[in-house]
Image (spheres, rainbow, N blue to C red):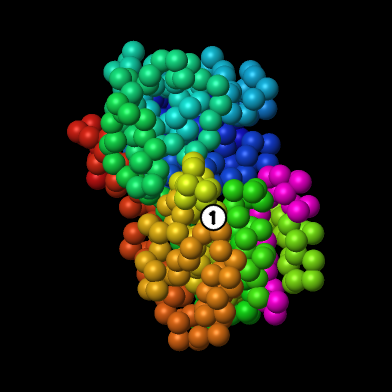
Amino acid sequence: MMVHRTEAPLVVHVSPTYFAPESVIGGGERYAEELARAMSARVPVRFVSFGPKAFRDRVNEQYERVILRNWTRSKMTPFSPDLFRELRGARVMHCYQLNTLPTFLSVAFGRLQNSASFVSDLGGGGWTPGYQIDLGRWLTGHLSISEYAARGIPLGHTNAGVIYGGVDLEKFPARAELCNDGSVVFLGRILPHKGIHTLIDGLPSDCLLRVIGPVGNDEYLGQLIRRSAGKRVEFLHGLSDSEVADRLRRAAVLVHPTPVNRDGNAGANELLGLAVLEAMACNCPVIVTAAASLPELVENEVSGLVVPPNNPPAIQSAIRRVIENQRLWKQLAVEGRNRVESEFVWPNVVDRCLRAYGNLEFGA
């Protein structure tokens, strides 16, 4: 629906991509839009991104969603001169992805109009003058999505706080009964850094694995299909949120097998594991590797299990523990949901953001 641009919002969220098939279906894109939408319950918000066609939606009274037509061929280096019009008069710029052109331009424009400028880096990047011109002197600060992500902030930049992320509990409700169908689930884009091969190698022969998510690498998908020969593995693509939540509410366990390199480093991958939080919200016990942000989300042996990375036998042992020990399964199912409700819902993230934005007279 096309609407006319309204008065300047208090906060403009700027992301190079948005959550849609013509842009990117990924956790980073979902994160940016979910936070912007949740924040609109407290203050006027505009979400700005770039795509093949321009459109403008009035999602609710305080939330305007604007997609500008991208003048470049790169999704991660988009540009439109209309960006500056959308930023005009905003009190705060909240940008996503540090090393992108839209973030550089937004922060520079914010400096000119005395707006506060924050960045939540989600691990992506493209070309930007920021490789030659340090944005640290213009930024108000970074709002990191995990302690792990905060450790990657460039020297000389200000850490304004860790805001984490959240789950929409209406989209990912608890299961009606504490029972399961015995299935194992992986949820996320099919890419090598997700470590799905490690999960397939460790999958018990009598378990069904559902790999749910869009294909990010066709060659890797082919490798996984060949690797799963003789095992019960289904690959499910293009599911809606409700269909994903339904699979999670029926599954016995979700495994998030993020690998590390020889130095024990996961790099810029899994700065926040939203799929893990979504599973926990659905009373689906989780098994995660001790990599990246994942140990921050799960309290080992209480709200989930944490296993060594790059270790199929450890994954297999943990899966068997969860499936065969009904008392443990129920504990993890209940405590996982409790942890999400108390720590990882979007209103909590909004509160952290508004506190970090500072004395800008935001209403309660």
**Residue at point 48% right, 80% down?**
329
Whether 274 is drawn above or below 25: the answer is below
Where disc 1 sits, the SS reads: loop
Q: Which residues are magenta?
A: 205-223
Is residue 61 among the parts visible in the rendering?
Answer: no
Whether 50 is drawn above or below 337: the answer is above
Seen in the image, is 86 located left or right of residue 355? right
Residue 181 in the image: state x and y as whole percent: 63, 79
Viewer-closest of 205 and 238? 205
The quarter in which the C terminus is drawn is top left
Please say whether residue 312 is one of the residues in the magenta stretch. Answer: no
**Residue at point 68% right, 45% down?**
216
Viewer-closest of 316 and 128? 316
- Going by the numbered disc 1, the residue's amino acid type is Thr
**Residue at point 63% right, 68% down?**
202
What residue would you read off at disc 1?
Answer: 258
Seen in the image, is 133 located left or right of residue 73? left
Whether 59 is drawn above or below 339: the answer is above
